[in-house]
Image (cartoon, rainbow, N blue to C red):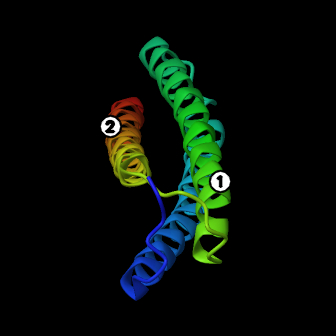
Amino acid sequence: MKTVTEDPELGVELQELYILSNHWLSDIHFAEDEMKFLKHVINKYLATHTLSIVLEEIGIFNESLGQQEITTLSIKNKILDLLKFIAPLVKGTGEEIGLDLIERFTALEMEVKEMFESVKRLKKSLFAFTEEVMRIECEIFTTEL
């Protein structure tokens, strides 16, 4: 396949792909910060508990966060690779463009969306669990009085 150099829309669309991909990096940094916050919640507010159920859940949350960090790093690397690929095309270096670029972008877009949904589910689950632990603590405290 050859690049259609006379198509001004192509340059605009490539720039849009580049901008969207670059924006994903900002989103990834936000997700990384959220995961740091979730770790902080676990370490500061839950890790001090001695209830076995709490300790089991902490292990599950830590494992989930570890897997999420691996996934996030993988997606970040894919985005950087895509940006490296798109950058010369935006500059019009005459590289060939194929449908695989759109397929690659679309697949990565789906991975980014799923990653954010996963972080959202994890956060929601952790907060619900934290609220439950707090409720149990209140019950224990009031029965001791």
Is disc 1 placed on a helix, strand or loop?
helix
Who's the residue at 36% across and 36% down the image?
129
Q: Is residue 78 above or below residue 95?
A: above
Residue 138 visible in the current orientation: yes
| Camera sees residue 145 | no
User: x, y (%) of residue 2?
Assistant: 47, 59
Task: Name which residue lies at 55% across and 46% down.
Answer: 38
Q: Quadrant of the C terminus?
A: top left
Q: Amino acid at mark 1?
A: Leu
Q: How many labels sit on residues?
A: 2
Relative image position of residue 57 (x, y in whole percent)? 45, 21
Residue picked out by circle 1? 80
Point out the residue furthest to the bottom here.
8
Q: Which mark is residue 144?
A: none
Give the crowd class for mark 1: few <14, some 14-19, many >=20 residues within 10 Å.
some
Question: Please, is residue 33 above or below residue 60 in the view?
Answer: below
Give the structural element (helix, strand or loop) at label 2: helix
Quarter assignment of residue 10? bottom left
What's the amino acid at mark 2? Glu
- Residue 131 is situated, as x and y percent measured from the top left of the image, at 35, 44
Q: Identify which residue is drawn at 55% across, 34% down.
A: 46
**Which of 30/129 is in front?**
30
- In this orientation, which residue lies closer to the viewer: 109 or 8? 8
Which sits in the foreground, 127 or 112? 112
Which residue in the structure is indicated by mark 2? 132
Please state which of residues 13 and 122 is positioned toward the viewer in this rendering: 13
Name the N-terminal-most of marks 1 and 2: 1
